[in-house]
Image: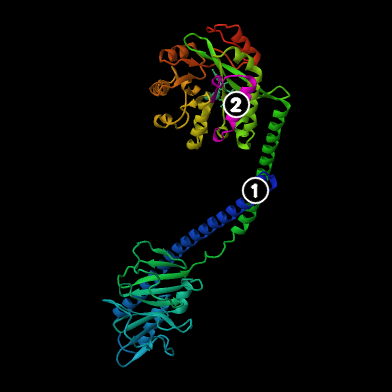
Amino acid sequence: MMPAARERLHSWFYRPWFLAMLATALSATLLTVGSLFVAMNQVEHNESQEMNAQGERFLVRLEQLFGQLRESLDDLQAQPLRGCDDEMIATLQQVSFNYRFVYEAAYMDTSRTCSNRPRQEGVSLIRPPDIKGPTYSYWLNTTTEPDENRAALMLGRGNFRVATSRGHLTDMVDLSPGSSLLVVLDQGTRAIPVLGVAQAWPPAEPWPPKSRDALQVTHTRLIYRMPTNTPEYQLVLITPRTGMHVPAVWWWLLPASLALSACVGILVFLLVRQRQSLDAELQGAIRRGELQVLYQPIFDLDSRNCVGAEALLRWRRPDGTLTSPDLFIPMAENTGQIRQMTDFVLQRLLEQLGQLLRSNPQLYISVNLAACDVMVPRIGQVMARLLSVHRVAARQIAFEVTERGLVDVVVARENLQALRDVGHQVLIDDFGTGYCSLAYLQTLPVDCLKIDKAFIDALGHDAASSGVAPHIIRMAQALQLKVIAEGIEHEAQAVFLSSEGVKFGQGWLFAHALSAVQFIELITRGRRLSTRRLDDEA
Ligand code: C2E
Ligand code: MG
Ligand code: MG
C-alpha cells in the first residue's frame, strides 16, 4: 500500500500540468503577499513622512499664532489706558484689527470687563489659567462647543486677555478626521485637547517616549510631538493611521503578480515537458543502442605499459553528434535511468573485453558508479552474474565512486566493503574536489585515489594550488593507497608525478578514450607507448 501511494505521488510529480499549477499557485501566493507587504510598507512610509511634514507646518503656524497673541498683549500692556471707557474699547478693537489671529481682546479688573465684542461671552470665563508662566497665562480649550467663533485659546497678561477663535485655529491647521491637537502640561502628565476629539492620555506607554524622534508610530496611531520654544508646554498631534487598509496601488500590483505567476507556471510546464522529452530520448538511446562504451587506457608511469582502462560512456545521436556524459549522466542520475546505464556498461564491457581480460589476467577495467549504485547492493549481484557468465575474475573489475556518491557513508561503506570482499577494487574518483578528509578516508574501504584533473592541470602553472597534488599524494601514501593521476596532458606532468611516487596515470598524453577494437589492439600488440599518443576513436 505504502509503496503504491508513493509511486502515485511520484507519478503526479512528473506531470507537467500538475507541477505547472503548483508552481503558479505558489508563486501567485508569494507574489501577492509580497507585493501587498511592499505596498503596505510604502503606504506606511508615506504616511509617516506626511505626518512629519504636517507636524512641522503645524508647529510653524502655532508658534506664529502664539507669537501674535503675545505681541498683542505686549502692545496692550504697554499703552497707558486702564479701565473700560470708550477709548479702551477702541484700543481693543484696534488690536484685533492689527493682529489677524486675535479674535477677541478684552480688559478686565475686579469690577469691570470690556471687550471689542461686547455682546459675546467668550472671555468672561473666570477660571485659573491652565498654564501660568512668568509673563503670560494661558487658557486652553476654553469651550468645547462646536462654535466657530468661540475661543479655543486665550492668553492673558496683567488685566488684558486676547483670544483666538476656533475658526482661526481650524482654518490654519487642517486636522484630518479623528485627529486631535493636544497641549501637554506638567512634564507630560496632563494633556488638554485644543482641537479635535478627546484622547486617552498618555497615548502610548511609556510617556514621554524614550526615543527622541518627533514621530512615534504605534499600531493604530501616529503621535507627533512638537518641541516648542516654551518649556512649560508641549504640543502633541495624534492621528489615527490610514495605512491599515489595502493600499490602492496594490490593486494594480495584483493583476501583475497573477500574470507573472502564470508565466512561471508556463515556464515550469515547458521545462518539465522538455525534461520529460530528454528522459524519453535517453530511454530511446539505450534501446536503440546509441550509447557506446569507450576505454581510456591507464598506464604505469615508469614503464609506460598499459595496466588497464576506465570505461567511459558516450551518447552518439543518430545525426552523429556526441552528447557529453557530463550532461546526460547527471540527468540519468535524477531520473534513475543511471541504473540501466551502469548495467549496460558492465554488460557491454564484458561482451567486448571478456576475451581480452581472460587472456590478460593482470589487466583491469574500472567502471564509474553513480551515487545510487553505491546505495544498494544491486551492483554486486549484477556483476557476479556477468563475471560467472564471462568467466572473468572479480579483481579485473574496479569501481570508481566520487566523494559526492558517499552521501550516506554507513550504507555506502557496507556496499563497497561487499564489493571488495569478492575481490573488486574500489577507487575514489575526482579526489580532492569533495570534502573527504584524511580521517574520513581512513574509515572507507578503498584501494586507490584518483587525483582530479584540476590538480594535475595546476602542476607547474599555478603555484598556489600546485601544492595540492603533492599533498594528496602524501596523504594517499600515508594511508597506503594507490594513486592514479587523471588528465595528464604534458610529459612534464608525468615526469613530476612519477618523481613524487605516483605509479599510475591516465590522460591525453598517453591516449584518448578508445573504442573496444582500438583498446584490444593496443593490448594485444603489447605496444609500449612512449610519448606517442593514440587518437580518440571519436
Ligand atoms: P571521470 O570519471 O573523472 O572521467 C574522466 C574524464 O576526464 C573523462 O571525460 C575523460 O575523457 C576525461 N579525460 C581523461 N584524460 C583527459 C585529459 O588528458 N584531458 C582532458 N581534458 N580530459 C581528460 P568524459 O568521458 O567526458 O566523462 C566525464 C565524466 O562523466 C566522468 O568523469 C564520469 O564522472 C562520468 N561518466 C562517464 N562515463 C560514465 C559511466 O559509465 N557511468 C557513470 N556513472 N559516470 C560516467
Ligand atoms: Mg572516473
Ligand atoms: Mg575523474
Q: Quadrant of ligand 2?
A: top right
Query: Where residue 89 sits in the image (x, y, percent)?
Result: 38, 86
The region drawn magenta spans: 374-399
Query: Where residue 481 sits in the image (x, y, percent)?
Result: 43, 22
Q: Is residue 209 magenta?
A: no
Q: Which mark is residue 143?
A: none
Q: Does the magenta stretch include residue 392?
A: yes
- The answer to whether 262 appears left or right of 212 in the picture is right
Residue farthest toward the bottom in the current orientation of the protein: 111
Q: Is 222 or 206 nearer to us in this picture?
A: 206
Quarter assignment of residue 310 = top right
Q: Residues within 10 Å of mark 2 (few under 14, many from 20)?
A: some
Task: State whether residue 508 appears in this view.
Answer: no
Say which amino acid is labelled 1: Leu
Q: Identify the main secondary structure in magenta.
A: helix
Q: Is 11 or 39 nearer to us in this picture?
A: 11
- The answer to whether 46 appears left or right of 11 in the picture is left
Q: Is 261 or 441 nearer to us in this picture?
A: 441
Query: Where residue 404 sits in the image (x, y, percent)?
Result: 51, 33
Badge 2 or badge 1: first in the primary sequence: 1
Q: Name the residue under label 1.
A: 9
Task: Give the SS element for disc 1.
Answer: helix
Q: Name the residue under label 2.
A: 384
Q: Looking at the image, which residue is at 31% across and 70% down? A: 230
Say which amino acid is labelled 2: Ala
| Rendered view: 170 above or below 276 | below
Judge: label 2 CB < 8 Å from ligand 1.
no
Quarter assignment of residue 512 = top right
Quarter assignment of residue 79 = bottom left
Task: State whether residue 301 appears in this view.
Answer: yes
